[in-house]
Amino acid sequence: MNIAKYDRRHRVIRLRMILSMHAAMVLTLAAGVGACLSGCSHIIKRGQSPDSESMQFNEGVEQPTYIGDVAGATGLEKLTVEGIGLVDDLDGTGSEPAPSSQRDYLIDEIKTHDVENAADLLESPDISMVTIAAQIPAGARKGDRFDLYVKCMPKSKTTSLEGGYLLQARLKPMMTTSRTVEMGHNFAIGQGRVLVNRLFDSRDESFNLVNGIIPGGGVVVKDRETGLRLIDTARSVHNTTSMARAVNARFTARVDDSPEGVANPTNDRALQILIPEEYRNNIGRYFHVILNIVFVESAEQRINRLELLERQLLDPATSSISAIRLEAIGQDAIGALKRGLRSDDFQVQFHAAQALAYMSDNSGVEVLAKAIEFEPAFRWHGLTAMASIHDNVSEKALISLFDARSAEARYGSFRALRESMPGSPFADGDFVNREFMLHSLSTTSTPMVHFSRARIPEIVLFGAEQRFNENLLFIDRGITIRSAGKDRVELIKYSATSGTKKLACSSLVADVIRNAAALGLDYGDLLKLVKDAVTSHATDMNLVINAVPQLSRSYRAGAQPGESGESGEMEGEMEGELSNNYVPEEMPEMFDDKPAAESDTLPEKTSKGIFGKFGRSKNP
């Protein structure tokens, strides 16, 4: 036996245990705060949303003073954090890192966990040093999750990160010089299973094996604040106090289970702004609404302005800004918005329905559902608005969209349902191997299986009765999965140390996935299994990867739903025809996942508990 190799492996296992215990303690602290501030971290691409074309809405419309005339939003940028970490479980494809400031930093990090001979650990071929990069969204709170992007160093001899697991690493604002690595304050920790880019990119370039993503692998440990800042000529305690009074008359947020005003003046030019749950999926819109609150207005002026805004709402050219300003008024504007739903112009209907949704009014649900299904330019906005409504009307509408023609509409509606109605049995699923979620939905449309590649590792089966057929044969790294006759599948795992293990199950896709995971296949392996089955015609279902709505689509004025954008049978990457231009993209807010659960004990079956405990389980 190679004693040195055995000793290294023993110390790696010890390091894992230390990191896992430390991670659990961090998450216990984070979850304690998260219990008071439950929600999810969200941020949109600024400047791509029709709602975010500009925050200067106030020229030439009315005379009253809007908050946006004298103040702007702060804290809406993303915070870039970085780290250096170890990826384990590489089965001989790793390498020892060359001398560098990054290596020195990593060794110092390992030493903080009382691991002896830290430098020797890096000699293992089952380990690779990686750099980690991520962006923490605006408004993120302790316990919120975000994606990590990992890659090997430029001169690394590591050949593949496939199947690797990033051990816990601290993430901070970082600057690397020629001699040292300088770090800012700790904002997050991260760990998890690496999904290499090759899973999503059919090109056979080597860099696709040493770059990857860890969906939801980062956990925020420090809240990010948002607020308002007055221009120099308007700064005064009187103005910040008046603004806070006007904002708090419109919005409240729950703090320690009690409603409180969202605005808190901190000095003569700044206010801290909390984010209500109904806007947690769309922080950008929330601040647009706040900037269009009038903070100096008489009762007569308010009545006259309501009448003017209703006329402007019915004009497609001004309906978007008018809906925002009516939303800023609040309950007194609901009547005008409902009358907007009766317009002959779909754009007017949509803007009215969207504003009503954020005011917890379901009158426009039918309009939103039509936009989600047929109008790609409005799809993201419709899904996000629907996610803010928490009632049976929106639940029923979202469930009906599981059978839509568009893959984006189908998967997006599922995610919106989980946001709006987390207790719905239609959003429930199984937390498999404590690594990914599996959902089986009863649908009547074209069978489809959806894999996410960001925010949360999950497999969603649209059609619970989907099966593999007699053509099924998958062989990969000591695993064989094959048809064993009609409606039966055999799974075999070969191991030099533990011998051969066999399982048998039905040919239902969900059953095969569960049994394959029991034999040690991870999320990336299962994606390869399904891709191979589609390519070899071992299934009739469509494979779709990351079918998320985009924010850059345009709407043609006067068009009816479906006339201004795509109208294909299925949108997204499917049937093995994967994108050849995979770039880590920013997901819309709606597809961020929930923060860590309030307990460090995971239930066996939950729709919210995938990240309930920050730890890992070893595959059998």
Image (tube, rainbow, N blue to C red):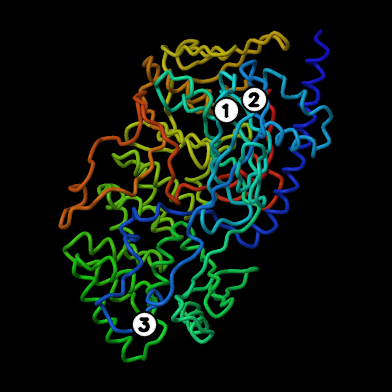
Residues packed near mark 1 inside 10 Å, few (<14), some (14 to 19) or many (20 plus):
many
292 to 29, vertically: above or below: below
Q: Earlier in the sequence, mark 2 or mark 1?
A: 2
Quadrant of the rendered structure where residue 535 is? Answer: top left
| Mark linked to residue 47 | none
Q: Nearer the viewer, residue 236 or 2?
A: 236
Quadrant of the rendered structure where residue 8 is? Answer: top right
Q: Nearer the viewer, residue 202 or 570?
A: 202
Residue where numbered disc 3 is placed: 65
Under mark 3, the amino acid is Thr
Nearest-to-viewer mark from 3 and 1: 1
Q: Nearer the viewer, residue 487 or 234?
A: 234
Residues tagged 3 and 2 counted as in contact (Cβ below 8 A): no
Residue where numbered disc 1 is placed: 152
The quadrant the C terminus occupies is top right
Q: CA distance from mark 2 to mark 1?
A: 8 Å
- Residue under the point 61% across and 31% down: 130
Under mark 2, the amino acid is Ser
Residue where numbered disc 2 is placed: 128
Q: Earlier in the sequence, mark 3 or mark 1?
A: 3
| Tag 3 secondary structure | strand
Please provide percent x and percent y for residue 291: 40, 72
